[in-house]
Amino acid sequence: MADNKKEVTFEEKIKLLEEIVKELESGEVPLEEAINKYTEAMKLVKDCSERLTKVTDKVNKIMLENGKLEDFTVEE
């Protein structure tokens, strides 16, 4: 059976994180639910941080004519 689970995009994770923060800031979330929401938010933060790190690493590399990847540096 194929896995039909859709990967949540970075943008969707940020939106979910913003919604959780807004709910928690309202102060109207019961303690147990707030703990669960906080845990979910921290997982989203970790996922987003890891994704940004991977993308940053890719952006900081340039493809040389010989096909090797090299760190990008700016010469002043």
Image (cartoon, rainbow, N blue to C red):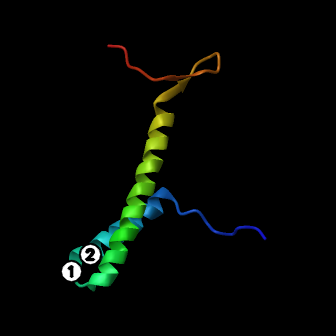
Q: Which residue is mark 1?
A: 27
Rendered residue at 48%/42% (across/down) = 55
Residue 14 in sight in this render: no
Could you tell me if the residues under marks 2 and 1 are in contact, i.e. CB atoms within 8 Å?
yes
Residue 63 drawn at (x, y percent):
57, 24
Residue 56 lies left or right of residue 28; in this view the side is right
Q: Secondary structure at mark 2?
A: helix
Q: Is residue 30 above or below residue 70?
A: below
- Per the rendering, the mark at residue 24 is 2
Tag 1: residue type?
Gly
Residue 61 in sight in this render: yes
Residue 48 drawn at (x, y percent):
43, 54
Count of labels shown? 2
Residue 69 drawn at (x, y percent):
57, 24
Rendered residue at 40%/65% (across/down) = 15
What quarter of the picture does the N terminus occupy? bottom right
- What is the distance, in whole Å, between disc 2 and disc 1 at their CAs? 6 Å
Q: Judge by depth and name the residue closer to the eye, 67 or 37.
A: 37
Q: Is residue 74 above or below residue 52?
A: above
Residue 33 position by quadrant: bottom left
Q: Judge by depth and name the residue closer to the eye, 13 or 40.
A: 40
Q: Residues within 10 Å of mark 1 (few under 14, many from 20)?
A: few
- Per the rendering, the mark at residue 75 is none
Tag 2: residue type?
Leu
